[in-house]
Image (tube, coloured by chain):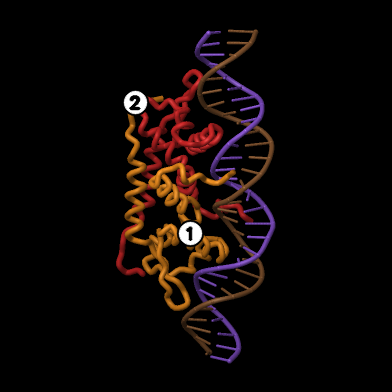
Chain colours: A orange, B red, C brown, D purple
DNA sequence: AATATTTATCGTAATATTGCAATAAATAAT
DNA sequence: ATTATTTATTGCAATATTACGATAAATATT
């Protein structure tokens, strides 16, 4: 026991949870913010920008990439990471729809 | 090793991560959706609605409450849970601002 | 008072996550 | 070719999360 029982939830619930989870770490938020801000988008700067080990950053980048939130293209010896435009749009729509699912009503609590 | 190093990130990055993490589980997405949909908002239905044990649901509710996303008022023997209106608004603004921080530019990747 | 109903908490097992050193892999520079 | 530079992967160790049975706590019902 101790495994998330994804099979009992809807596709949508799992999809939302996966997207949120991919972002649910301060390092990954920081990475995403940094990538958004940097127009040049060559990375490796991340290691000194955040105070984490290179292996740790690489791991977080992989998670973001697996979730489809960023994409990376090899640029010689380094890698250029940037936001995945289409998927980020989908993310905004999916999460936005979920968050806007709440309409305040004064009947409750 | 193995502990999230919150001290090296900004308040904002940690705050966003905590909020996302609170929602980053299909059971908690399902609970939030159910609470949003039910006008009456008396719960305990959740146990049969989702297929999880009562203790597990209670644990997830506690997490959502701790994060400030829901509030619960005692209603006799049962508890009435509903979305925390002000905090949900803040959540939308915080997460929204983060997600909208990306402006597509064709200079990259 | 005794019993039922509902939610919270505790204890525990299984698994997942986080972080880093060490090392590999792959290209660039000398 | 050899040496740097940069990123990925592997292999741990420390913690955190998820789930559930058992039990406690608190109010309703009989």
Residue plotted at (35% across, 33% down): B37
Crowd rating for badge 1 (residues with CA inside 10 Å; few <14, some 14–19, many 20+): some
- In this figure, which residue is indicated by the disc labeled 2? A106
Foreground disc of the pair 1, 2: 1
Residue D10 or residue B4, whichever sits in front: D10
Residue C21, image x and y in percent? 66, 67
Determine the secondary structure under disc 2.
Answer: loop
From the image, which quarter does the C terminus of chain A lie in?
top left
In-image side of B77 versus A70 (left or right):
right
Instruction: Estimate the spatial distance between the alpha carbons at disc 1 and disc 2, rounded to whole Å.
Output: 41 Å
Q: Identify whether B67 is placed above or below C24.
A: above
The answer to which of marks 1 and 2 sits earlier in the sequence is: 1
Residue C7, image x and y in percent? 52, 27
Residue B55, image x and y in percent? 56, 33
Crowd rating for badge 2 (residues with CA inside 10 Å; few <14, some 14–19, many 20+): few
Residue A63 shows which numbered tag?
A: 1
Residue B48 or residue B81, whichever sits in front: B48
Residue plotted at (33% across, 39% down): A101
Number of numbered discs: 2
Residue plotted at (50% across, 56% down): A27
Residue B19, image x and y in percent? 46, 44
In-image side of A51 versus A80 (left or right):
right
Image quarter for residue C13?
top right
Determine the secondary structure under disc 1.
Answer: helix
Q: Identify whether B17 is placed above or below C20.
A: above
Chain letter for mark 1: A
């Amino acid at each position: 026991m101790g495994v998330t029982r994804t099979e009992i939830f809807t596709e949508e619930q799992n999809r939302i949870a996966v997207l949120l989870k991919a972002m649910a770490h301060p390092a990954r938020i920081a990475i995403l913010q940094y990538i958004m801000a940097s127009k040049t988008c060559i990375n490796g700067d991340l290691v000194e920008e955040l105070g984490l080990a290179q292996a740790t950053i690489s791991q977080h980048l992989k998670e973001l990439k697996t979730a489809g939130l960023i994409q990376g293209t090899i640029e010689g010896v380094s890698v250029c990471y940037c936001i995945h435009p289409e998927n980020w749009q989908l993310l905004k729509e999916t999460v936005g729809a979920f968050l806007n699912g709440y309409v305040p009503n004064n009947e409750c609590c």
